[in-house]
Amino acid sequence: MNEFTLLKNFEFDTLSLPDLLRNRFARLNFDISYAKSSENNKYCAFWNSEHLLFLDWEKGIKLTQYKGTDIANCWITNTGILLVEDWSDSSLNGKITIFNGQEKLFTRSFKANILNTGLSPDGKYASVQLLRSNNAHSNQLYVYDIPNKKRYTIHKGYIDSDTYAFSENKIMLDLKKFKAIYDISTGNFVGKINN
């Protein structure tokens, strides 16, 4: 079986940021609630519920400034691909927006709540698990092929997984008792690994 990789990001306490950086954000009237970096620490995102700043930490430059309505999370690859998870300020709505550095690649909106999102370490795939609505988006697990802007439905129904690992054209979901493996392009279940 192919090796699956899980994107690793590091969350850090915003109070541990140097005073110089916190003061700089304060001068911008930017109140930081959350901070996350890519595994290689090259890229960092700082956000609160309405604003997100995405920085190339090594070069010290701002790549993207995103304004949302209820930013819940983000994922960052070592190459600068950023997925922003925005829950929206109204019930049963959510969206994901994906950037490559300063370039917005695409945004997808949903008429359902977002449970979880994920991003493959190479930035090729993004996943989003939706729930709690009475329309076609409810209880769907979608995977997006980012370069080709294609959506695949992996599973119709609720899946309780907060971890998405990727290998070539497959996604592995941690379902507590076992890990389920699906083919991304067909959405078919192709195997499982017991925990």
Image (spheres, rainbow, N blue to C red):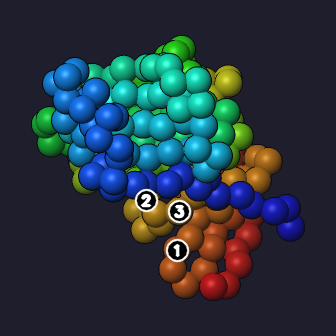
Spot occupied by residue 9 in the image (x, y as percentages of width and height) = 53, 52
Above or below 100: residue 92: below
Q: Which secondary structure, mark 3?
A: loop
Name the residue carrying label 1: 175
Q: Earlier in the sequence, mark 2 or mark 1?
A: 2
Asked which quadrant contains residue 23, the reply is: top left
Using the numbered discs, state the Cα–Cα distance from disc 3 to disc 2 in whole angstroms: 17 Å
Q: Residue at x 44, y 46 (%)?
A: 36
Spot occupied by residue 126 in the image (x, y as percentages of width and height) = 56, 40
Q: Is residue 71 visible?
A: no
Q: Residue at x 53, y 32 (%)?
A: 57
Spot occupied by residue 38 in the image (x, y as percentages of width and height) = 57, 44
Q: Are marks 2 and 1 in contact (CB under 8 Å)?
A: no
Name the residue carrying label 2: 157
Name the residue carrying label 3: 163
Q: Earlier in the sequence, mark 3 or mark 2?
A: 2
Above or below 10: residue 150: above
Using the numbered discs, state the Cα–Cα distance from disc 2 to disc 1 in whole angstroms: 13 Å
| Label ID, residue 45 | none
Tell whether 50 sits left or right of 149.
Answer: left
Spot occupied by residue 101 in the image (x, y as percentages of width and height) = 56, 21
Q: Of residues 173 and 32, which is closer to you in this image?
A: 32
* Quarter of the rendering occupied by the C terminus: bottom right
Amino acid at the residue labelled 3: Thr
Amino acid at the residue labelled 1: Leu
Q: Residues within 10 Å of mark 2 (few under 14, many from 20)?
A: few
